[in-house]
Amino acid sequence: MDSPDPALSRAAEIIEQASGDKSARPSIAGFFDEATNTVTYVVHDPASGEGAIIDSVLDFEAASGRTSNGPADLVIEYVRRHELKIAWILETHAHADHISAAPYLQERLGGKLGIGREIIRVQEVFGKLFNAGTDFERDGSQFDHLFEDGETIALGAIEGIVLHVPGHTPADMAFIFGDAAFVGDTIFMPDFGTARADFPGGDAAQLYRSIRRLLSLPDETRLFLCHDYKAPGRDEYAWETTVRQQREENVHVRDGVTEEEFVAMRTGRDRQLAMPKLIMPSVQVNIRGGRLPDPEDNGVSYIKIPVNAV
Ligand SMILES: [Fe+2]
């Protein structure tokens, strides 16, 4: 791509600098939730202990409507054991396959809740679908901060930057800290490919451009994914790759695959995919910053399911 992209150039500078300087690289722990195939990350600056939690999971059993904090408690235990100061609780996007544990974590560990600015569009779309009342603000005010493309973010001495990478949803962001990029639902492991682009507001061509933008970061950039589902011939879960590996091997978007080819593949495949099991509860809660809908007059919160509307 020849068009100037200052945010991308700055991201590449941060990554290159961190690749050559161990003290500019963050410590990273991934917590894999088998029930939703989601990876939650704790990323921190080893020098100051300042850290961020990315894409947390609240356990939810759809049949009984019961939540539990098991996956989030593992994260809390890790944060306390390493005596980290949590500055940020980040969402790469409003997830459709699991409920966020952000409010639970924030209450116990502090930190500001952040997501991409385009969450406002996602709130608009799903606010209508769920016929949310006027008490549901569609201005992103449920979050402490809305990120723009190219905004910088730091954890102690570790420099970082945020890139807007829409396509899976309008609000997807990638968070870069040092030489590590947390790319959410854009790209998956090279043998699995890419995220779907058929949710309301999703766009396969946009997803292709976002992924190619990420893959124009330096070869050695460490990529941390939001999900893994294994892949034919692979028995272990995996969630870390590099830009180089993706450019060489990704079954959907390796170098040489055109936008047209990708869009045809992606839209064809998406037509065959079922909706994620937890899409209705997840989206309803996650567009509220992970808070349940306000309790009704009996004190109980309800999750709605729109019938024949999606
Ligand atoms: Fe997602």
Image (cartoon, rainbow, N blue to C red):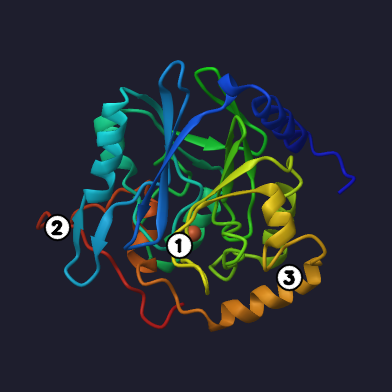
Could you classify mark 1 by the number of other residues whose Cα lies within 10 Å: few (under 14), some (14-19), or many (20 or more)? some
Indicate yes or no: mark 3 CB to ligand 1 under 8 Å: no
The residue carrying mark 3 is: 262
Q: Check disc 1 and report its element: helix, strand or loop.
A: helix
The reply to whether dot 3 and dot 2 touch (C-beta < 8 Å) is: no
Q: Nearer the viewer, mark 3 or mark 2?
A: 3
Q: Name the residue at the left extreme.
A: 298
Q: Earlier in the sequence, mark 1 or mark 2?
A: 1
* x, y percent for residue 211: 69, 55
Q: Nearer the viewer, residue 229 or 296?
A: 229
Q: Can you give x and y, in whole percent of width and height, for residue 244 in the image?
A: 71, 49
Q: Where residue 296 appears, x then y in whole percent?
A: 17, 57
Under mark 1, the amino acid is Phe
Q: Which comes before the other along the chain, label 3 or label 2?
A: 3
Residue on which the image places disc 1: 126
When the figure is inspected, residue 152 is found, relative to residue 280, above or below; the finding is above
Give above or below for 286 relative to 158: below
Residue type at mark 3 is Phe
Residue identifier under label 2: 300
Query: Gap between marks 1 and 2, in whole Å?
Result: 21 Å
